[in-house]
Image (cartoon, rainbow, N blue to C red):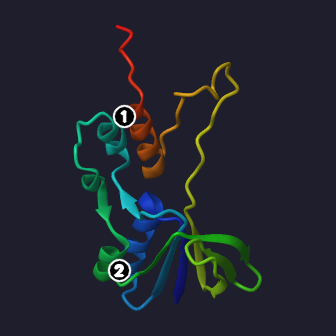
Amino acid sequence: MKYLIIGAVAGGASAAARLRRLDEHAEIVIFEKGEYISYANCGLPYYIGNVIKDRNALFVQTAASFHQRFNIDVRTQTEVTAIDPAAKTVTAVDRVSGKTYEETYDKLVLSPGAEPIRPPLPGIANEGIFTLRNVADTDYIKGFVQQNTYKRPW
């Protein structure tokens, strides 16, 4: 049985680990369009606020350690751009090399995450207004704060 999982982090990585426990012979592939497959989401604001000093402390598993531990093919920086359920294939793009290819599957798990909602409020697009969902957002916010000085309003 060949499983493809679109999206890693909490949902996809957990599904992959569970599938491995259920079937040690299954072929399991995770596609993650970002760089990281598992990180402490709740720790992101603490890293921005310097409660967590070491950025590496945010990472629970790397693609290599996940592969070694669970024998799962983890493809980071790879985005699935199309799904053909009739043919049971996905089209994927390696965002580093630019290579596009197809991958077949028997079962498909969708765990692509979400985008933050930015309500149509006055000033929502102003500098200094952020959404925090992933490590890239964390790095951007922390860099912004380090480059700008602000005083607390209280």
Residue 66 placement, left or right of 5: left
What residue do we see at 36% from left, 34% from top?
A: 146
What residue do we see at 23% from left, 49% from top?
A: 54
Q: Quadrant of residue 129?
A: top right
N-terminal-most mark, 1 or 2: 2
Point out residue 30 in the picture as x, y percentages from the top left corner: 49, 75
Residue farthest front in this picture: 147
Q: Nearer the viewer, residue 26 or 32?
A: 32
Q: CA distance from mark 1 to mark 2?
A: 35 Å
| Front: mark 1 or 2 | 1
**Which mark, by number, is residue 146?**
1
Q: Quadrant of residue 25?
A: bottom left
Residue 154 placement, left or right of 15: left
Look at label 1 and name its amino acid.
Gln
Quadrant location, the C terminus: top left
Look at label 2 and name its amino acid.
His
Q: Is residue 2 above or below residue 143?
A: below
Point out residue 47 in the picture as x, y percentages from the top left corner: 30, 41
User: Do callouts 1 and 2 mark residues in contact (Cβ within 8 Å)?
Assistant: no
Q: Is residue 150 above or below residue 53?
A: above
Point out residue 78 in the picture as x, y percentages from the top left corner: 56, 72
Determine the secondary structure under disc 2: helix
Determine the secondary structure under disc 1: helix
**Which mark, by number, is residue 28?**
none
What residue do we see at 63% from left, 26% from top?
A: 124
What residue do we see at 27% from left, 56% from top?
A: 56
Q: Quadrant of residue 9?
A: bottom left
Q: Residues within 10 Å of mark 1 (few under 14, many from 20)?
A: few
Instruction: List the residue tagged with mark 2.
Output: 67
